[in-house]
Every structure is written in C-alpha cells, then in structure tokens.
Amino acid sequence: MGEIINNQNWFELSKDFKQGKPFNHVVIDNFFKEDIALNIFNDMPGYDENTDARYDNLIEKKRTIQNWHKFSKNIYKALSFLIDQRFTYYLRTMSLEPDLVADFGLHGGGIHMHQTGDYLNTHLDYDIHPKLDLKRKLNLIVYLNPNWKEEWGGNISLWSHDDETNQPKDLVTSIWPKFNRAVIFDTTQNSWHGVVEGINAPEGQYRKSLALYYLIPTDDLDNKRQKALFTPRVEQKGNEDVMELIKVRSGY
C-alpha cells in the first residue's frame, strides 16, 4: 500500500506544533491526497448506520464506529496506513517522541459523527490506556466533509488551563472542520478541548471525521485516569445532574 497522504515537512511541522497555543498542536490542510479523501468520505456511513456507540447524554452526543470489521475498504486502508510504522515515524519526528506507537485497537477512535444539536463538552482525554498501560500522547483528527460550511459550526475548541481550579479557563483556539484538514495535538498538557460552539447543519449533513490516538511508555501508572474528565458547558453551570454524570463518567 503506497502513501495516501500529501508530502509534508515533518521537521518544519514540529516547530509549528511546539508553538501551538494553548497547548502543542498543528493544523495540516490537504492531509490526504484529494481522491483518497473523497473516497473515504463517500464510504462514510449514515449517522445511525452500523454504529458501535451512540452517546446521547448531557455531556456528549455523537455516534462512533471503532470495529475494524465495519469499515469499508477505503476507510480500512486509510486507518491501516495511519497506524503503520511509516506514518508513526512521521509523528515521532514531529513530536520528538522516539517510542511513540499507534493504538491499533482504536480505543475511543475510528469514525466520529455529529449532527445538528450534537456536542462534546470540553474535556481531558483519558491519560492511561485502560488495557495497554501506555500514556496517551497524541490525537489525530481528520475532517472529511467536502461541503462543510463555516456557518454550520462544529469547530473544535482548545482551552487554556486554570491551575487553581483544575478546569478549563479561556477559549484560545477554535478550528473549523474544513474538508481534508488534520489536527494533531498533545494530550499530556492539560489539553482541554471539545465541540461546544454548536452545530447547525442542514438535515442530512453530518460532521464526519477519523480519529486516531498515539501512545508512549510511562512509569506514571499511579495516575488512574482511564476515562475522560468532562466539564459542564456554560449553560450547565450549577446543574447537579450534569455534575453527577461527570463524576460517574470520569470513574472518580
């Protein structure tokens, strides 16, 4: 299988990655070769089709597919490339993490879909993989809607960290899910992120993306956060039901 992504200078991207605010991140446009990106999008399932997980609660509303057997040929090939050593080498070059490996099991990854009214509260991802005892280091998200308009929303929001409250502080960066745009970010830097600015797309239009995660060895196994830690949206502040769900969802 040949390379399916456009050429990048990963040494130069490393500089951009380190300069990302509020935490290390980089945005790569035209990530896949265009015909590949279109093939992947055309193979994407419908919102309620063949999903593995249907999140529909006060802090997250979305659909996901993580089962390799459910992926079409084009999607299977794309994900296989993104967990392959050739691509992981690029990420090692960019992140300066020589022991970085892909999560072959796609725990929490795969296909993600959001429709109008969906959301993903600002959160920190799990820190220690629940089955591999490795530390989650990088997220890679590739957006795949060729006709997604800016006014439809669905931006991923990156927030600074409040040391005193251990909560997100200020919205620093908002990234539009432009077609064939990849976002890579470090999840070890109090990396608060979410989809909270709203999605307002026409009926039948779903925000679709591929998500992959990359891990590094760690001796910090006393850190037991094996689930995401969410925070309430602005309109949910003081809502006891939301706070209880966050507590249960985080496993604390």
Image (tube, rainbow, N blue to C red):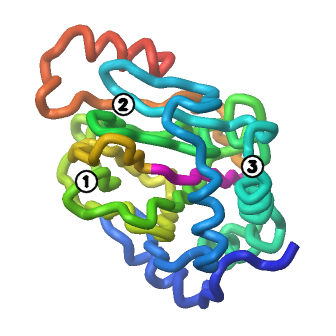
Q: Secondary structure at mark 3?
A: loop
In the image, which is nearer the foreground, mark 1 or mark 2? 1
* Main secondary structure type of the part rendered in magenta: strand
Task: Calculate the distance from the C-alpha at mark 1 to the C-alpha at mark 2.
Answer: 21 Å
Q: Is residue 20 visible?
A: yes
User: Residue at point 53% right, 61% down?
Assistant: 142
Contact between marks 1 and 2 (CB within 8 A): the answer is: no
User: Residue at point 58% right, 78% down?
Assistant: 34
Q: Describe residue 7's horizontal placement relative to residue 47 as left or right.
A: right
Q: Which residues are magenta?
A: 208-216
Residue 140 sits inside the magenta stretch: no
Q: Which residue is mark 2?
A: 230
Residue 222 falls in which quadrant of the image? top right
Type of amino acid at the residue the image marks with label 2:
Phe
Give above or below for 202 relative to 158: above
Give above or below for 210 relative to 199: below
In the image, which is nearer the foreground, mark 2 or mark 3? 3
Q: Quadrant of the N terminus?
A: bottom right
Q: Earlier in the sequence, mark 2 or mark 3?
A: 3
Give above or below for 35 relative to 234: below
Q: Describe residue 216's horizontal placement relative to residue 175 as left or right.
A: right
User: Residue at point 48% right, 50% down?
Assistant: 208
* Horizontal and vertical percent position of residue 128: 63, 37
Q: Describe residue 198's horizontal placement relative to residue 2 as left or right.
A: left
Q: Which disc is residue 153 wearing?
A: 1
Q: Which disc is residue 72 wearing?
A: 3
Looking at this view, is 132 or 220 the one in front? 132
Q: Secondary structure at mark 2?
A: strand
* Horizontal and vertical percent position of residue 63: 50, 33
Q: Secondary structure at mark 1?
A: loop
Q: Earlier in the sequence, mark 1 or mark 3?
A: 3
